[in-house]
Amino acid sequence: MDYVVVKWLHILSSTFLFGTGIGSAWYMLFANVSRDVRAIAVVAKYVVIADWLFTATTAVLQPATGFYMIHLAGYPLHSKWIMWSIALYVLAGACWLPVVWLQMRMRDMAAAAAAAGGELPALYWRYFRIWVTLGVPAFIAFVVIFWLMVAKPM
């Protein structure tokens, strides 16, 4: 495949990956801040769908296109900027996997609370705090990866 095509796929998939993450985090955060159980249930449902539809697929496409571009461009795999990018990507993925599990549990708790017309359980809010805590390093990792991809500083 032509380098420009692979680069375009890489950039497009990174846009979907990062954009879905930012959008999901934004809506999930503010739905939770509202404390409106019905809104939280709806948003959590669609955040889980978006994660599986966009984040999971692009999370696979990113390393595939990235390693192929490294090969096509002839960059040494041991370049510091590549090694840092890989390490940060693994860190972001290590944060994302439990986030997906948390989101599915939060979705289910919110749906049950909305259907019953009740409040969200304390466990929901504990999961939400963990969700936020895991999102921060993942966000920072992706911002640094974007910089490394553009600047290739080392």
Image: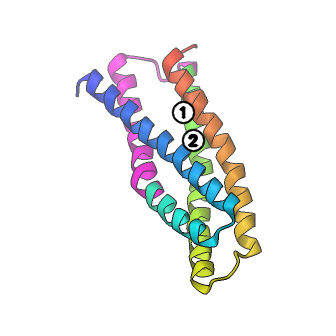
Q: Quadrant of residue 99?
A: bottom right
Q: Is residue 70 magenta?
A: yes
Range of magenta residues: 51-80
Does 45 sit above or below residue 94? below
**Left or right: 45 with respect to 31?**
left
In what element is the residue under mark 1?
A: helix
The image's colour scheme reads rainbow
* Residue at horizontal 55 percent and vertical 44 percent from the top: 22
Mark 1 vs 2: CB contact within 8 A? yes
What kind of residue is marked 2? Val
Q: Is residue 4 magenta?
A: no
Q: Position of residue 60 (x, y in %)?
A: 41, 45
Is 59 or 27 nearer to us in this picture?
A: 27
Circle 2 sits on which residue? 90
Q: Position of residue 23 (x, y in %)?
A: 52, 47
* Residue at horizontal 46 percent and vertical 42 percent from the top: 17
**Left or right: 62 with respect to 40?**
left
What kind of residue is marked 1? Ile
Q: Residues within 10 Å of mark 1 (few under 14, many from 20)?
A: some
In what element is the residue under mark 2?
A: helix
| Chief SS of the magenta region | helix
Q: CA distance from mark 1 to mark 2?
A: 6 Å
Q: Position of residue 34 (x, y in %)?
A: 67, 61
Quadrant for the C terminus, please. top right
Circle 1 sits on which residue? 86
Quadrant for the N terminus, please. top left
